[in-house]
Amino acid sequence: MSSLAHNSIIIIGFYSLFTGILPFTLDVDQQFIAAVLTIIGYSINDNVVIFDRIREYKALYPKRELKEIVNSALNATLSRTINTSVSTLVVLIAIAIFGGESIRGFSVALALGVCVGTYASIFIGTPVMYDLNMKRQAKLEAKKK
């Protein structure tokens, strides 16, 4: 949840800061809303892939610590996440360069969102999940005592 909010805030901030500065329009219109919603969907997909691998590893290795499971899951999904993001980014940059003026702002927002969404799912979403799990586990252990 925090990584999704982070991604949305970054895109909205980018549009706010660079409106009128960049040589193409950054109007807040239906394309902008579509870009933000697409970025949120892309980020959800990244998070689901990582969290599903964590869930899978928890079932496969029940005696391992959560830290090891999360690290293994991130390592297993890192190449897939990076490859997907880079291939998507190449297409979005091509659209931004060769596309028409009407779609340029949309593709730039998506390109920024892909970059931000990729690092957010790895460096924000997963650590927040780990911290929340550790806090919940500490509360459960405290209740047992």
Image (cartoon, rainbow, N blue to C red):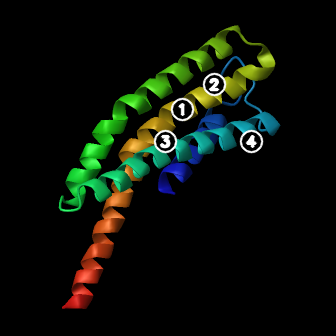
Quickly name the residue at label 1: 114
Quickly name the residue at label 3: 46
Q: Position of residue 41 (x, y in %)?
A: 61, 44
Alpha carbons under labels 3 and 2: distance apart: 20 Å
* Precedes in sequence: disc 3 or disc 4: 4
Q: Considering depth in this image, is 32 or 47 the residue closer to the camera? A: 47
Amino acid of disc 2? Val
Quickly name the residue at label 4: 33
Q: Considering depth in this image, is 40 or 102 the residue closer to the camera? A: 40
Which dot, 3 or 2, sits closer to the camera?
A: 3
Could you say whether the residue bearing mark 2 is in a helix, strand or loop? Answer: helix
Could you say whether the residue bearing mark 3 is in a helix, strand or loop? Answer: helix
Question: Is residue 68 found left or right of 32 in the rendered image?
Answer: left
Amino acid of disc 3? Asp
> Which residue sits at x=38%, y=59%?
129
* Precedes in sequence: disc 1 or disc 2: 2
Above or below: residue 19 compared with residue 104:
below
